[in-house]
Every structure is written in C-alpha cells, then in structure tokens.
Image (spheres, rainbow, N blue to C red):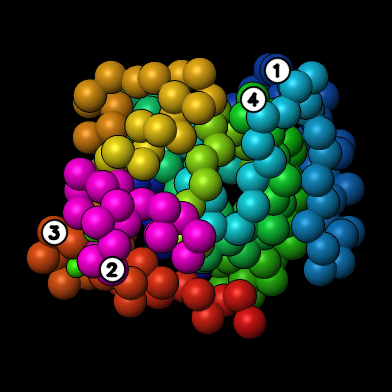
Amino acid sequence: MHSGMMWKSVGCVLVLFVSSQFGSWSVWAAADELDGEVKIEFLFKPEQCTQKSKKGDLLNVHYDGFLAKDGSQFYCSRSDKAGHPQWLVLGVGQVIKGLDIGMMDMCPGEKRKITVPPALAFGEKGKDPVPPNATVVFEVEVYSVSRGPRSMEAFRKIDLDKDKSLTKAEVKQYLKLEFEKGGKPRDEPFYEKIMADIFTKSDHDRDGLISVKEYNIYEHDEL
Ligand SMILES: [Ca+2]
Ligand SMILES: [Ca+2]
C-alpha cells in the first residue's frame, strides 16, 4: 500500500546479479532472522554533514532492492527512468515503511544498507516479483537533502506572497535557494524535473497551485 511509487516501473526487474555481491549473500540470509525491526548498516558516511534527513524532507536518492533470502535483485533505480536518481519526500509513505524509517538522519553522500522485515516492506502477500513474507534489503545512496516541502515551516517560507497557496514560481524559488545554500546551483531542466514531480504528487485538483490542504495532506502522520 505504501509502495506505489517504488513500483511504478520495474523495468530492471530481476537483473542477474552476480559476482560483486556474492560476499554479501550470507549477511542477507542472516537477515531473515530479524524480527520486526529495520536494520541499518552504514556503507559510507561523509566526513562533513551539511544536513541530516528528517521527516518531510525532499531527498534525491538511488536505491537498489534485493531479496534477503537469495540476494536476487528486484529493483534498481539506476536503470529506471533513464537512471536518474529518484525524488521522494521522506516519512510520508511514498516508499515502503521500512525505507521511511531507515532513511532518517542521512547526510548527502551517505550510503546505507537497510534490511526490512516483511511487515514493514511488502507484507504477507508480497508484491510481484517480491514473494510473500519476504525480508528485503535496500542499498541506498543519498545525493541531496532539502527541507520541505512537507513541513508547515517550509510552507510559510515558500509562500512568498502569503496567500496560502504555492505557485510553481514560489516553489522553484525556494528549491533554488535550498540548493544554492548547499553550494550546488543546478540548471533549469533540473528544477523543471523536480517541479513536475512535486506538482504531480501534490496538486491533486490540478489547478497549478498547491493549497495548504494539498500540501498538508500527510500532516496527520505526525500524530
Ligand atoms: Ca503564494
Ligand atoms: Ca491545487
């Protein structure tokens, strides 16, 4: 139920995944014994951390998904959408619960291996090609962490003319400031891509504006 985004296109399903990962299979097998908790292993931590991810942040990430039982790969964002890293809002159910939990407090540049028990992944039923009751393992690399767009704090900052709705221009202005703060100004197509993602997911009545209600749609999760 929480996995819609991840499964939109599973173009790279079941790529034969051999050589380099053999060494890790024993670890994955052991992961089957986890009960109920997300397990995080740190593969790489940058020395400097400008911003740690928290609920509501916009993350740019690559992730690969494997079955714990045999290490077979069932998802890879690197061959999905022409290999662009994915945009997602953390902690609001755009990805499986286990990733929402496992990607908290990540720094830009950080890599993690996140092992997720079935209850926080695809459950008793599974979701093709993930079988029922499967523990899954994700290797995640975070490229960037930006505040918002799902905190009221961010909403007020973005809404420059204070009319309680967000235009594309306002959102874009905000993203630009955020990226420039991180010392990484981007080109126009880069922002257009994020804007399209954000408005597709948030502008539910398609009037070209994000209202407080649309923006705030996940706030009840906080409780
Ligand atoms: Ca406005
Ligand atoms: Ca709207």
| CA distance separating discs 1 and 4 | 21 Å
Tell me, yes or no, whether the highlighted magenta stretch contains residue 156.
yes
Kind of residue indicated by mark 1:
Ser
Foreground disc of the pair 3, 4: 3
| CA distance separating discs 2 and 4 | 34 Å
Residue 114 percent coordinates (x, y): 73, 45
Q: Residue furthest front?
A: 161
Q: Which residue is mark 1?
A: 20
Bounds of the magenta span? 152-171
Disc 3, SS: loop
Residue 35 percent coordinates (x, y): 86, 66
Q: Is mark 3 within 8 Å of ligand 2?
A: yes
User: In the visual, does 183 lie left or right of 136?
Assistant: left
Q: Are marks 2 and 4 in contact (CB under 8 Å)?
A: no
Disc 1, SS: helix
Query: Badge 3: how crowded within 10 Å, few (<14), some, or many (20+)?
Result: some
Q: Which residue is mark 4?
A: 109
| CA distance separating discs 3 and 2 | 14 Å
State the image quarter where residue 52 is shown: top right
Q: Are marks 3 and 2 in contact (CB under 8 Å)?
A: no
In the picture, the disc for residue 105 is none
Q: Which residue is mark 2?
A: 164
